[in-house]
Amino acid sequence: MKTYIKIVLLTILTFASCTDVVEVDVPETDPRLVVEASIDWEKGTLGNEQMIKLSASKPYFDKNEDQIVTGASVKITNDSNGAEVVFVDQNNGEYTTDSFAPILNQSYTLEIIYNNETYIAKETMRSVTDIISVTQEIDKDELSITAEFEDPENEKNFYFGKFKDRNEILPELFYDFDKFTNGNVMEFEYYVNDDDDDDDERSLEGIVDFRLYGISERYYNYISLLTDQAESDGSPFSTTPAPLRGNCINTTNTDNNAFGYFRLSQTVTTSFQYSSK
C-alpha cells in the first residue's frame, strides 16, 4: 500500500512540474431548453400562485448569465378532468399563473411549445408529513440543527429537505426515503458553518429556515444523481459528469430533450433561531 501511494504521489509531482499548455477540445452543442418547473403547494395555502422558469443551456466554460427563454407556450393539464392552466409569459424567462388547483395524488401533464417543438412531462402531486420538531445540539464546538418528521405507516414515501441559513448564500439540500424507517420518526441534520475557526470565543447566532417536500420516487432518483455530480471532488480519478436527463421529453425531436424537471410537491416550512451561547 505504501509503495502504491509513493508511485501515485511521484506521478502527480511529475505532471505538476510540466509547464506546457495543454489545449483540450471541448465539444460544442446547440443550446437546449432548461426547465425549472417546481410546483410547490405549502400546507395551509391555496397553492394557486405558481411559476415556471425557462432558459437555454450554455457551453461548459461560458461564464455569462443564463439565456432566458421567452415566447414559449406553457400549460399544465389535470390528467383526470382535462382542466388546463395556462402560464403567462412575463418576458423575463418566468411564466406565471394564479389559478393552479393542486390536488394530492393527482397526476398532471406539463406541455411546453418552443421553437416549434413540443416538450411533455408527467408527474403526480405528492403529499408531505408535518414537521414534529426542530432542535439544536452543541458537541465539541460543533452546532447542529435537527429537523424531525414522522413517516406515515404502510406507505412508500420519499422526502426532499432544504435548510437555508440566513447567514449563508446557498441552501443545503437533503433527500431520503423510508425503506428502513417506515412509520417511524425521520430526521435531517444540518451543521452550522463557522468561518472563524481561530476564534474560540465566537458565538454562533442566526436563523435557519427548513422546508420539507414530499416527492416521487423518480424525482428522488433524479435529485440523488444530481447531488452526486454536484459534490464530485473533480479529482483526476473522479467520474466524469454526464448530462442528467430529467422528465421533460421532446416529442417532436427526441434527440433534443430538455434539461430540468417537472415536480409537484406538497411542502411544510418552519424557522428556527439557533445560538451557541
Image: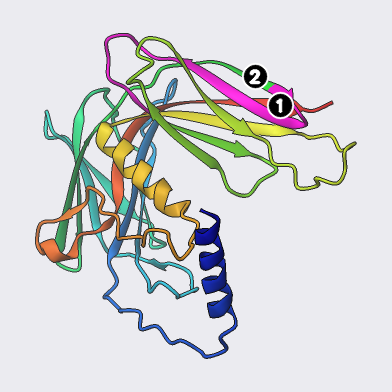
Identify the residue at image location x=45%, y=75%.
62
156 is within the stretch colored magenta: yes
Q: Is residue 187 left or right of residue 159?
A: right
Q: Which residue is mark 2?
A: 135
Residue 149 in view, yes or no: yes
Disc 1 crowd rating (10 Å Cα; few below 14, some 14-19, many 20+) is some
User: Would you say the magenta stretch is mainly helix, strand or loop?
Assistant: strand
Residue 97 in view, yes or no: no
Q: Amino acid at mark 1?
A: Gln
Residue 256: x, y in percent?
18, 65
User: Please, which residue is most extreme toward the bottom here?
Assistant: 20
Q: Quadrant of residue 43?
A: top left
User: Please, which residue is most extreme toward the right here?
Assistant: 201
For discs 2 and 1, the disc positioned in front in the rendered view: 2
Q: Quadrant of residue 10?
A: bottom right
Callout 2 secondary element = strand
- Depth check: give the residue in front, 82 or 221: 221
The answer to which of marks 2 and 1 sits earlier in the sequence is: 2
Q: Is residue 138 above or below residue 74?
A: above
Q: Which residue is mark 1?
A: 273
- Marks 2,1: beta carbons within 8 A: no
The disc at residue 3 is none
Identify the residue at image location x=38%, y=21%.
128
Q: Is residue 260 above or below residue 142?
A: below
Identify the residue at image location x=70%, y=22%.
137
186 is within the stretch colored magenta: no
Residue 151: x, y in percent?
39, 14
Q: CA distance from mark 2 to mark 1?
A: 9 Å
Q: Quadrant of residue 178?
A: top left
